[in-house]
Amino acid sequence: MRVLVGGGTGFIGTALRQLLKARGHEVTLVSRKPGPGRITWDELAASGLPPCDAAINLAGENILNPLRRWNEAFQKEVLSSRLETTDLLAKAITKAPQPPQTWILVTGVGYYQPSLTAEYDEDSPGGDFDFFSNLVTKWEAAARLPGDSTRQVVVRSGVVLGRGGGAIGHMLLPFRLGLGGPIGSGQQFFPWIHVKDLAGILAHALEASHVQGILNGVAPASTTTNAEFAQALGTALGRPAFIPLPSIVVQAVFGQERAIMLLEGQKVIPRRTLATGYQYSFPELGAALKEIVA
């Protein structure tokens, strides 16, 4: 297939691009910078959708970038980088003389309200209690297409783990030094997924014509808490992992609103993802972390 990928130059996009090419698909990226095998967002806005069989959007400013202060300007950037690119692609699909067969968007499990007791699957309510849940609601609404000529899939991703990027990139140094440990209380759930499985779910959604609607992009080991994750990462590295990172430090570094993403969590079940027939490469945390730190 000819696949158009918005924001395909980052950590997840690189893994997806490699997988799609390995499966024989032709990939064109939409990015801010021109280059071979790419079109720019401006070109997409001016000329419309190039001929393609499917479109996937991964674009969005990194919310947990520790170098960026959580202020009004950055919040606007986080919103616009997601909503504007999604809206642009959705409108281009709608106007295309030959619209693609499939349209896939990656959002986040921040749609579901953090809880120490609730369990969420793809049919669970959410999306209206804080900045991030409202962001996901607006994001998914921007992607919605009229009619049913194009199959539509939304993958709500958990924390993406993988070699050379993602959440692990910020954690490895303190853990290697024996200074790692749980964040805050450590009791919060930690919905995670290996980057190869997130790319795999996207490829599965692309290729399997029966897949549509919401999928939770998390590993089936959904009962993992933050403290258990810290322990497993310490074990994979052969280091102790019992020095907690206090909530007050997390709030100071990331800002109170953004710190919620690290200090609170959700127990998310990929019920529909499993029901579609997707088979995980890394369903268990220990094996996932061993592969990442090897």
Image (cartoon, grey):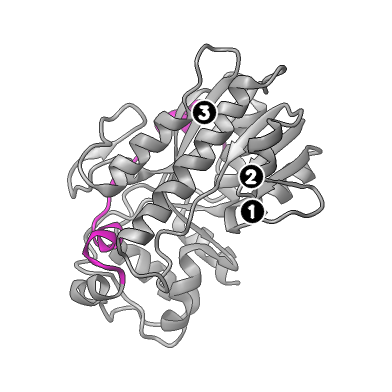
Residue 238 shows in this picture: yes
Which residue in the protein does label 3 denote?
153
The amino acid beneath tag 1 is Arg
Circle 2 sits on which residue? 41
Q: Quadrant of residue 215?
A: top left
Q: Which label belongs to residue 32?
A: 1
Identity of the residue drawn at 29% across and 60% down: 258
Q: Is residue 174 above or below residue 267?
A: below
Mark 3 or mark 1, which is nearer to you? 1
**Position of the C terminus by quadrant:** bottom right
The quadrant holding residue 21 is top right
Evaluate if marks 2 and 1 touch, with contact meaning CB atoms under 8 Å apart.
yes
**Against 122, is 164 above or below?**
below
- The Cα atoms of the two marked residues, 3 and 1, are separated by 24 Å
Q: Would residue 15 be found to the left or right of residue 63 on screen?
A: right
Q: Amino acid at mark 3?
A: Val
**Mark 2 to mark 3 CA distance (whole Å):** 22 Å
Residue 6 location (% of width, % of height): 62, 43
Rendered residue at 58%/18% (across/down): 210
Q: Which residues are magenta?
A: 254-279
